[in-house]
């Protein structure tokens, strides 16, 4: 069950961004898109480089296993640059590997 939370100070976010993020995560992690949850919080009051007018993205990617995190970090960064129009240096990704015994779908634990 991959969970992607995206926080950004970019004001405009549309449905395409959310759905594209879900498809990307499913493809990269080789998991069914029906298990992917994406939460985008835009227009946040955030500081990048110590300035609130610098546009950036903070992502938290949780999953039961990742595979190649370095490659996924690059893919997520490229996605943020393309979809949010921010510079790659202002895209931060935090990975959290969750044990299946700590994740449930529909009330059933995955491990």
Image (cartoon, helix red, strand yellow):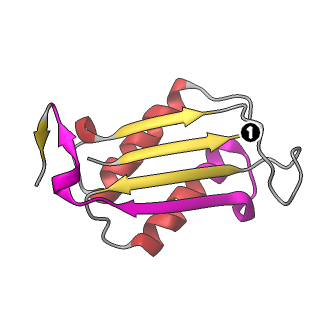
In this orientation, which residue lies closer to the viewer: 74 or 61? 61
Q: In the rendered image of this protein, does residue 107 appear above or below residue 67?
A: above
Q: Is residue 49 left or right of residue 28?
A: right
User: For the residue labelled by badge 1, is the local secondary structure a helix, a strand or a loop?
Assistant: loop
Magenta residues, start to end = 80-106
How far from the left and from the top, in percent, is residue 74? 53, 67
Residue 105 lies within the magenta run = yes
In this orientation, which residue lies closer to the viewer: 32 or 54? 54
Q: Residue pushed farthest front? A: 102
Q: Is residue 34 left or right of residue 40?
A: left
- At label 1, counting other C-alpha atoms closer than 10 Å, the crowd grade (few under 14, some 14-19, many 20 or more) is many
Q: In the rendered image of this protein, does residue 20 appear above or below residue 12?
A: below
Quadrant in the rendering for residue 108: top left
Dot 1 corresponds to which residue? 9
Q: Quadrant of the C terminus?
A: bottom left
How far from the left and from the top, in percent, is residue 106? 15, 31
Q: Residue at x 56, y 43 (%)?
A: 6
Quadrant in the rendering for residue 109: top left
Residue 26 lies within the magenta run = no
Quadrant in the rendering for residue 62: bottom left
Q: Is residue 52 left or right of residue 88?
A: right
Q: Residue at x 22, y 47 (%)?
A: 103
How far from the left and from the top, in percent, is residue 58? 62, 51
Q: Residue at x 32, y 52 (%)?
A: 27
């Amino acid at each position: 069950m991959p969970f992607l939370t995206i926080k950004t100070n970019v004001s405009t976010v549309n449905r395409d961004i959310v759905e594209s993020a879900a498809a990307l995560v499913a493809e990269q992690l080789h998991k069914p898109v029906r298990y992917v949850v994406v939460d985008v919080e835009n227009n946040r009051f955030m500081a990048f480089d110590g300035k609130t007018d610098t546009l950036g993205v903070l992502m938290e990617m949780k999953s039961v296993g990742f595979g190649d995190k370095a490659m996924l970090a690059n893919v997520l960064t490229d996605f943020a640059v393309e979809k949010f129009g921010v510079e790659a240096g202002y895209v931060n990704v935090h990975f959290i590997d969750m044990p299946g015994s700590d994740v449930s779908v529909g009330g059933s634990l995955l491990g």
